[in-house]
Amino acid sequence: MTQTIAPRVRTLVLLLLATAGLLLTTAGPASAHAALTGSDPQQGVVVDKAPDQVSLTFSEQVALSNDSLRVLDPKGKAVQQGKPFEVGGTTYGVKVHSGLPDGTYTVTYQVVSADSHPVSGAFTFSVGAPSVTSVSVSGETAGGGVVGWLYGFGRYLSYAGFIVLVGGGAFVLACWQRGAGVRPMQRFVVGGWLTLTSATLLLLLLRGSYTGSGKVADIFDLDLLGNVLQTKAGAALVSRLLLLAAAALFISVLFGAYDKREAEEKRDLTFGLAIGGTVVAAGLAASWAMAEHASVGLQAGIAMPVDVLHLLAVATWLGGLSALLVALYRSQTPIESAAVGRFSQVAFGSVVALVATGVYQSWRQLGSWSAFTGTRYGQLLLVKIGLVAVLVGIAYISRRWTAQLADTVVRQGKRAPQKERVAANASGSAKSAKEAGGAESGAAKKDGGRKQTGGAKKAGSAQGDGSKRAAQLARQQAAMDTARQKRTRDADPHRFGLRRSVLAEAGVAVVLLAVTTVLTQTEPGRTEEEAKAATSAASSSSSSSSAQAGSGAVTLDMSFDTGGTDGKGVVTVDVDPARVGGNEMHVYVQRPNGRAFDIPEVKVALTLEAKKIGPLAITPDHITTGHWSASNVQIPMAGDWKIAVTVRTSDIDQTTVSKNAQIG
């Protein structure tokens, strides 16, 4: 039976790791907590006079570098001067050369949000009149590429190492103290420490390139590393390394002196290890809370300790679960049902804490029910909630197997006295036989004493060979006893059922960890909706101002959803001067959070239904990220024209949205 289990375990583990890797590789660049909520000049506008500076407003404070804000002319030449600066609050600006000529200018930004994630994007504005630009910024995405993938993988490893280290240590100390002397359990916890330490060092090296150029060559740039150490994220990673040094001391005591102590000394040492381990574990969890989503936004003073408690609950549950899996599959020392029962109680408390803290975090990060389905963060959170529900369901099955295993142990304990009496009788009979044999041996010794003296050397040699043979037989017998015990243990249907349910729990936990890692790199739903509302308000204000100025231009905003992956967004159509004859048309495509992005195809059709004219097909040219333009668009007569825009987000996903506008 065990021979068939091992291949299944390996296959399942490989499938789960592949699933986790797929989730990480398809996660894409990190969406950040900060979002662009406004700019001056605004995106897509045409101004009569060249501005002295360009300013951008974000949803929260961000960190700037010398190249965070750039302004490029139609030929791609930088026209900003000096370093970016803080205008006030969450608004940042950069000076531009005076007397900019007419044309379309591209503004690019790459900053770091307060929760440590890189933010990048671009938009355009025009001076005098729009023009063709050679600038292409579609490939400039912060947190992408090889460095972004490595950074995401490092984050996954750091979470996994933290869970194994903290959960495994808690399992040994609180549930199965005999496990301190079990070699597979020692390797398991030490492996968690090594994984977390290695991942932290990797993140520290990658951080500068991850938030900057994204180049692999910059990973070992010492100047970048020095700059990272001065940031909040860098300080958090260094603090984590220092705490890992204290964790190494905890591990050495737990798997060294602790197992060799007597019962009374072990009791005192258990209390000390529990206090010290809790402090170190809380400090490690705080190294995430102090630099990520919990540290900024609404109720940060409450959110950070809640986040620490959430991480500790996750580690205690999932890490202890993994330790139980090691004990059931790898340990030669059978784990007692009482230890499994204690872990069941600890896991139940962890799940209660996990649910309570998770509800608060969901409310804080989403803010509305619509954000569950309308934002990527909410959709990932729904997946996480579903996985937790599945995990709790499997855990309930494990608790039932644990109860049945405990009942079996109790019944075996009741039968033990009878076996002991039988063994005692057998032992007494053996003792009598031994005494009788001893008497006969004594008589033989008296009768043949002289012969025995003569053959002493031969007898000694035979005795030496016999002792070696006895030792060999003893080793073989011990191996046979161990194998027999293992077969007996594996043949227990209750223990076998527990092993399968715990293995299934661990499999779901691997996928849950991958989803959580992606979730921590995704822009919270509350921020995404606030940015969307701010962008819509700015667009409405811009349209109103244009109408009041009597420019005659028409601006239409239309939401679309092609139904595919990344298929939601807003398309904006500008027709200037919206009169009979030649017109300039600009089409802008944005994500729901206001960020410009490219799609494979955009087509426009004009129809004057009252006169049965059209549809007049227009295929605009791609200018820059999220911007298409068509010049000399001929509108033959005035009227209420229907402007239909077809957007295609993939080979098979497309939709058409339309609005009417008075032209002429």
Image (tube, helix red, strand yellow):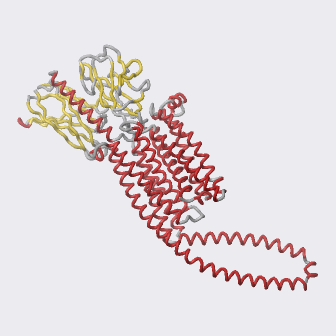
Q: Is residue 72 left or right of residue 405?
A: left
Residue at x 51% of width, y 52% of height: 167
For this rendering, which residue is in front, 125 or 338? 338
Q: At which x and y percent is residue 201?
A: 54, 39
Spot occupied by residue 616 in the image (x, y as percentages of width and height): 14, 35
Left or right? Give the position of 586 relative to 11.
left
| Viewer-nearest residue: 398 or 112 | 398
Residue extending furthest left?
Answer: 611
Instruction: Find residue 8 and report its horizontal and vertical position in percent.
Output: 49, 63
* Residue depicted at x 41% and y 51%: 354
| Residue 652 visible in the snapshot | no
Q: Is residue 184 left or right of residue 162?
A: right
Q: Is residue 17 above or below residue 28?
A: below
In this view, 614 is above or below 381: above
Closest to the observer: 474 or 343?
Answer: 343
Figure disc tally: 0
Residue 340 visible: yes
Residue 296: give x, y in percent of width and height.
39, 36
Examine the rendered structure and indicate whether residue 328 appears above or below residue 590: below
Q: Dividing the image into 4 quarters, which one contains the C terminus?
A: top left
Q: Residue at x 37, y 19 (%)?
A: 80
Q: Nearer the viewer, residue 639 or 339?
A: 339
Say above or below: 571 vs 44.
Answer: below
| Left/right of residue 2 with respect to residue 607 in the rendered view | right
Find the residue positioned furthest to the top. Answer: 99
